[in-house]
Image (cartoon, rainbow, N blue to C red):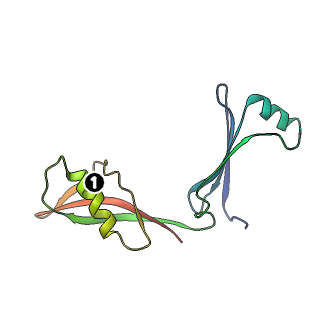
Amino acid sequence: MKLKDGRITMLADRDNGFTIELVDNEASTTFVRVHLTADQFMAAMARLGYTPCTIEVMALDRVGKKHEHKAFAFEMPECDWKSQKETAKRLVTQKCPEGWIPDIGFSSQNSFFKNGDKNMARTIIRRYI
């Protein structure tokens, strides 16, 4: 597979060594993170092949897909502010359109609002196509 719009980040840190991250920009997803100690990094820079390192691979199901996101608002039942977040988390998973994944933090200033006399909640939903 060849990615149209890949990105690479290389970070050096005195305490944590060296990190390389690979990102599929179309999917807005970091899918590989390589950690090297200072000694491993210097060995690789000296062209030592097969230098040992730690590799973290994640979100491979998103690689090569396009990331879409949009705001999603839904009506909330009457509830007190203490249970508002938990109620919203439960409801958004029920009301979210099929194929979309909701963010369930509900900690933004705009997460809860009134639309006329209706209590509403808002979050971001995402999908990868």
The reply, left or right, for residue 53 in relation to residue 62 is right
Residue 129: image location, x then y, percent: 54, 72
Residue identified by numbered label 1 = 111
Residue found at the far left of this picture:
117
Dot 1 amino acid type = Ser
Residue 92: image location, x then y, percent: 31, 63
The reply, left or right, for residue 91 in relation to residue 68 is left
Helix, strand or loop under label 1: loop
The residue drawn where x is 27% and y is 52% is 110
Q: Is residue 36 above or below residue 5?
A: above
Q: Is residue 124 above or below residue 65?
A: above
Q: Dot 1, how many residues are within 10 Å of its Cα: few (below 14), some (14-19), or many (20+)?
A: some
Quadrant position of residue 61: bottom right
The residue drawn where x is 79% and y is 39% is 52
Q: Nearer the viewer, residue 42 or 61?
A: 61
Q: Is residue 48 above or below residue 99?
A: above
Residue 93: image location, x then y, percent: 33, 64
The residue drawn where x is 56% and y is 58% is 28
Q: Nearer the viewer, residue 93 or 113?
A: 93
The residue drawn where x is 60% and y is 54% is 58
Residue found at the far top of this picture:
14
Q: Is residue 8 above or below residue 100?
A: above
The reply, left or right, for residue 27 in relation to residue 90 is right
Q: Give the position of the N terminus as an image quadrant.
A: bottom right
Residue 73: image location, x then y, percent: 28, 65
The reply, left or right, for residue 39 in relation to residue 97 is right
Quadrant position of residue 40: top right
Q: How many marks?
A: 1
Residue found at the far bottom of this picture:
98
